[in-house]
Image (cartoon, rainbow, N blue to C red):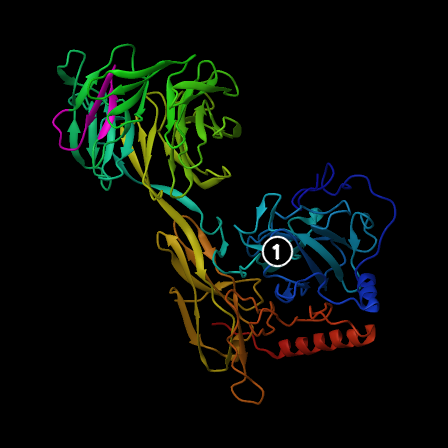
Amino acid sequence: MTPTPDTAPGTAPGAPPGRRRPGRRTAGGAAIAALLLAGVPAGLAAGADAGGPKTATGPKGQKLTASVTTALDPAGQKVRMTGEGYGLTSGIYVALCKDNGDNRTPSPCLGGADMSGGSKTSQWIVPPGDPYEGDLALAFGPGGSFDVELDITAKGDGLDCAEVACALVTRADHRAAGDRTQDVRIPVAFAARQPGEPGGEGVDVPAGTVAYKAAADFTSAGKPLDLLLHPDSKKLYVGADNLPDTADVDERGLHVLNPQDGTSESWISQAPGSTGALRASAAARIAGPLPGDGVVYTYPLRGVGSAKAGDKEAAGVWLAGSTITDIAPGTAPGTVLVAQGAKLSEVERATGAATRTLTLPGGTRFAVDPGRGVVWYGDFTAGKLHRVDLAAFAVTGTFDLPGGPGLAGFVEADPATGAVWVGVDRSVLVFDAAGKLVKTLVGGDLARAAAFDRATGRAFVVRQDGGDLSDPADDNNGTLTVYDTTDFSVAARELSLPGNHSQAGAASLGVEPGGATVFVASPAEGKVTKLVRQVSPLVTRAPADLTAKDGEEVTLTARAEAVPEPAVRWQVSADGGQTWKDVEGATGTALAFTARAAQDGHRYRAEFRNDVGATRTAAATLTVTAATGGGETDGGTGTTGGAGATVGGASGDGSGTAATSGGGSLAATGTTVMSATLAALALIGGGVLVHRRARRRAEGAL
């Protein structure tokens, strides 16, 4: 296994990373000299359309250059990395890593740290004479230089550069993991994205992170047992039992609430019992909606009823046989599917007569996938899942629930994919439409309810705490977790549900189409909690590099999408992005000011922040030219997000290429080096010119 740069190889920090291979190999200056003498074109394997080289300056003056940084191939890209000015007393890693911002360790990194000598996803560079020099690590060349090639992809080893900001970096090796002086970062982008374009750099959570927040508690519906948000009327139906804490009121029945504020619009408490006489009855489980408004539901012990807002009492029938354990819409208008233990029947709602009946090997709960004509029947006692063909009304398959018998949670079918999700104890077992177990999602609490949103492809799972505080595993708090139904990744930050435990009944939930609002019932607390979706800022417009004359008015613009609306502040760096400070009073999406010579090379970025998190745009570089003088042009054509920027103050023309800020690396021009002498003179001369010019610039602040 290849360790990450955060993990010291071997058994202890500083210990050899496995057995050293005999022999050493030289790098750095020798490699560069060989390249020059061989006349190898610069920018090895870099596509002509994949952006030009970029250079970043480190806190100790180190220069890091990447041959290509934009339009990288997500499936695989070779990138040439060169450096100079690194110290010769400590080792570094060169890798593609998550960019966590200033003074924070770039981590995780793709492929970890290559300490085997075989992988090129990262490189380990050490001082000459270091014990690990050889097949395990390369040695710095003269002046702390190196020249290596990396093979990178957009995703792997826990890193996904399509989701988070990434950079090609150097950082101290495992023997000095806390040393931030070796951190040099060059932002990268895969495919058509530019660094800093839509997304931005999440500061505390990834840009565009989804989270849910409790917006209100509805306590007007007794002890909630089941929920349904009506697709037509948009009313919130709550099936409820009596709440013992309210001895003066018997809240049993079907409650109709306004989903905006939880106010009660209707309460149907009466339903016909075994003799046909009306009586106070709890609404145990809601089968589904009626057209326009209203729901079909079951009430104890064998009642099947229907009602809508404004009704005085429910219409219903009383079934023969045992207690109803589950209910769902039938295959024809006016029918319902009813489970009475292991017996599944299709029943006419008007008469209670069963049109067909099937007795299964066992079970109590089921889910219907009408699009595929299948019923999934859960037998938690025996640890089995039965598949029933609706047309034939016969069992067509039986599948094991791993772990054997367990606490019954739920059986729910995903209408989009045909997968069936089964909650057993603390796990959610996901079977595909053919009955193959494809995923097990383990949580810290009991899996008690699930719902799907076809619009977003999300599955919402409520887990309840056991509620036994004598058990060290219980803390009295449940959780809401949201999953992507295609790859089962967590699609929203997990939310704690304080007080939602299973001692007084199972939780239930309803999801508004689109997932913007979720309702979760807590029987133990006698409430329904309304949750609203929030999203951390996602940058939709990043500030662009620009060039201005001394005294010219300039404007930088940035925008982000977020829920709730984010606050914005602008920040400036006068040292190539190593440190940042807030621009006083700059709290709008546009930053306008008069450019001055002292601000030449300054970098500007916007930070957007809301309750979920903060996201920063990529930095834009300001180049300020003299107010008069021949040969100067008004630039300002830099690509959004700084694709034409050069870290450290050198100007860029916004075309996707930039001049390097010092010698020691070759531009990705695709031309053949004519001779080592001419190349050396060009590199040294260029370095002196930029260095002297930079020293003449006055540091300024906005």
Question: Residue 464, can we see it?
Answer: no
Q: Is residue 466 left or right of residue 662?
A: left
- Residue 423 position (above or below residue 274): below
Question: Residue 92, can we see it?
Answer: yes
Q: Position of residue 168 (x, y in %)?
A: 63, 57
Q: Position of residue 41 (x, y in %)?
A: 75, 67
Q: Quadrant of the N terminus?
A: top right
Q: Mark 1: which secondary structure?
A: loop
Q: Nearer the viewer, residue 516 or 535?
A: 516
Q: Residues within 10 Å of mark 1 (few under 14, many from 20)?
A: some
Q: Nearer the viewer, residue 505 or 598?
A: 505
Number of callouts: 1
Q: Position of residue 353 (x, y in %)?
A: 24, 15
**Residue 368 painted magenta:** no
Task: Give the farthest residue toward the top.
Answer: 321
**Residue 320 lies in quadrant:** top left
Q: Nearer the viewer, residue 555 or 341?
A: 341
Q: Magenta segment range?
A: 295-313
Q: What residue is shown at x 38% (from left), y 25% (from top)?
A: 367
**Residue 310 painted magenta:** yes
**Residue 150 lies in quadrant:** bottom right
